[in-house]
Amino acid sequence: MADGGMMSGAAPGLKATYVANLEVAKLMQNAYEDVLRIRRIVENSQNDLETGYKGADGQAFYGLLSSWDADVRQVEQGLLNVKEQMIATSGHQQTKQEEQLEAVQRQQSAFSGLQGPSGR
């Protein structure tokens, strides 16, 4: 099961939301890893070109890399902010879902008690 059995007693809508949140979290993690991978590629390129790229062209190149690096840092921070927000929201949603499930279970128990021992 995709949710590891954690939502086995949950309503289908809650389970679908949980599974969708897991997918979004995976996509966010993949995006973050891709940004880090690309950053390493650019850093390696910079190191390779560092010795031979001098003068005005070299300065322009390093200016471009600095600008790009600042943009990438903003993207990274944005991804981390979204991840933190998702974690906070997920915890809140899980608490609400657990409260709702407990309320349904109490109602079912009360209803069963009203029916009596024969179940009629």
Image (cartoon, grey):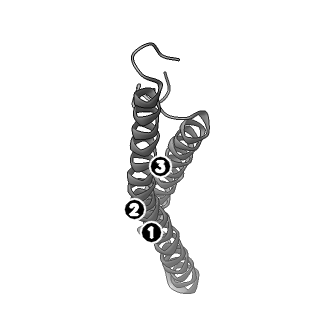
Instruction: Compare marks 2 and 1 and give the one earlier in the sequence.
Output: 1
Q: Amino acid at mark 1?
A: Asn
Q: Where is residue 62 shown, x and y percent of the image?
A: 50, 78
What separation in Å lies between label 2 and label 3 (alpha carbons)? 16 Å
Work out whether 59 lies above or below 119. Answer: below
The answer to whether 47 appears left or right of 20 in the picture is left
Mark 3 or 1, which is nearer the eye?
1
On the question of residue 111 being in view, the answer is: yes
CA neighbours of label 1 inside 10 A, class few (<14), some (14 to 19), many (20+): few
* Label 3 close to label 1 by CB (< 8 Å): no
Query: Which dot, 2 or 1, sits closer to the camera?
Result: 2
| Residue, disc 3 | 29
Q: Nearer the viewer, residue 26 or 49?
A: 26
Identify the residue position indicated by label 2 in the image.
88
Q: CA distance from mark 2 to mark 1?
A: 11 Å
Pick whichever of labels 2 and 3 is earlier in the sequence.
Answer: 3
Residue 31 lies, in percent from the top left, at 54, 52
The kind of residue on which mark 3 rests is Gln
Q: Which residue is mark 1?
A: 81
Q: Image point 43% across, 55% down: which residue?
A: 40
Report the residue at 46% width, 59% height from top.
Answer: 86
